[in-house]
């Protein structure tokens, strides 16, 4: 492009433009701002529970909790374990408003989900982000789950129904609570948008991290009670142990 008459050389050559990896800073030619070595070293989730994605020693098994008390959601899909550097990237995205890091993780999650769809996973009718408490939304300025759902919606061609769920109570932070306290904490904390029609619909909840699954269980139960035929959970990472803070 020769936009400066007195300069005889090209100012910008788009075909030679390279972006830098957001993790190591090296240049990369990949579609996302992450180099191949850094992407391969992410804590990819291996063998896991076929329902809640809890890491397990072998594939194709259910964890004890899902076997004894099947949850209201059908399946959790998460590409990574909540470990370095994904845990740091998620924290910086949520609490420091580092949107490029969240966008990168969202694009990689979209690729992972598309692979599952190509392998036969049933595609949901809509993506439903987990709503954020009003006080926390004011403090943070954005809902990370809603951003992830928007970033997934385009590449996957799945509508995002951002206002289907709302948080009716500002419950205490979940991180310091055990599983039983979390379930009690979430009772009556969520509600559906008035006149929402969910009959026979397949919905996918979107969040950043799954810990005990208490939030996913509460929301999936609400959606199933309202007529949803199936509820899945899409998130970035799964904690290695139930109750581990995220």
Image: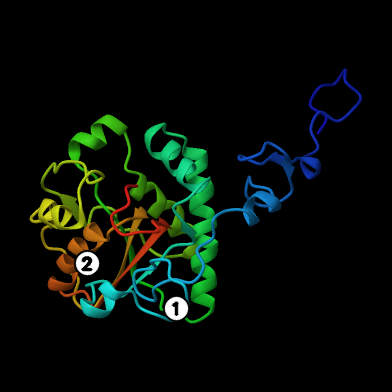
Q: Mark 2 points at which residue?
A: 220
Q: Where is residue 204 in the image (x, y as percent from the top left)?
A: 33, 66
Q: Which residue appears at 68% of the width and 36% of the height? A: 25
Q: Which residue appears at 88% of the width and 17% of the height? A: 6
Question: Closer to the camera, 53 or 161?
Answer: 53
Q: Mark 1 points at which residue?
A: 121
Q: Picture quarter containing residue 191? A: bottom left
Q: Which residue reaches farthest front?
A: 57
Q: Which residue appears at 21% of the width and 74% of the height? A: 228
Q: Position of residue 187 (x, y in %)?
A: 9, 56
Q: Identify the secondary structure beneath mark 1.
A: loop
Could you tell which of marks 1 and 2 lies nearer the N-terminus?
Answer: 1
Q: Picture quarter containing residue 17? A: top right
Q: Which residue reaches farthest left?
A: 188
Q: Identify the secondary structure beneath mark 2.
A: helix
Image quarter where the N terminus lies is top right
């Amino acid at each position: 492009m020769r936009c400066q008459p007195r300069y005889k050389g090209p100012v910008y050559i788009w075909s030679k433009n390279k972006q830098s990896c957001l993790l190591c800073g090296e240049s990369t030619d990949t579609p996302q701002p992450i180099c191949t070595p850094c992407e391969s070293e992410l804590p990819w989730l291996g063998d896991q529970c076929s329902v809640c994605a809890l890491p397990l020693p072998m594939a194709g098994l259910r964890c004890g909790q899902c076997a004894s008390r099947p949850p209201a959601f059908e399946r959790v899909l998460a590409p990574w374990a909540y470990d370095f550097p994904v845990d740091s990237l998620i924290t910086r995205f949520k609490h420091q408003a580092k949107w490029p890091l969240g966008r990168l993780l969202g694009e990689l999650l979209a690729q992972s989900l598309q692979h599952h769809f190509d392998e036969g996973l049933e595609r949901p009718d809509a993506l439903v982000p987990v709503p954020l408490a009003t006080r926390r939304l004011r403090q943070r300025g954005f809902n990370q789950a809603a951003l992830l759902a928007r970033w997934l919606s385009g590449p996957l061609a799945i509508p995002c129904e951002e206002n289907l769920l709302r948080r009716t109570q500002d419950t205490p932070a979940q991180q310091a609570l055990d599983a039983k306290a979390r379930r009690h904490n979430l009772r009556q904390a969520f509600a559906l948008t008035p006149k929402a029609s969910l009959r026979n619909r397949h919905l996918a909840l979107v969040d950043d991290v799954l810990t005990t699954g208490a939030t996913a269980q509460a929301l999936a139960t609400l959606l199933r009670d309202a007529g949803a035929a199936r509820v899945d959970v899409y998130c970035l990472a799964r904690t290695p142990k139930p109750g581990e803070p995220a």
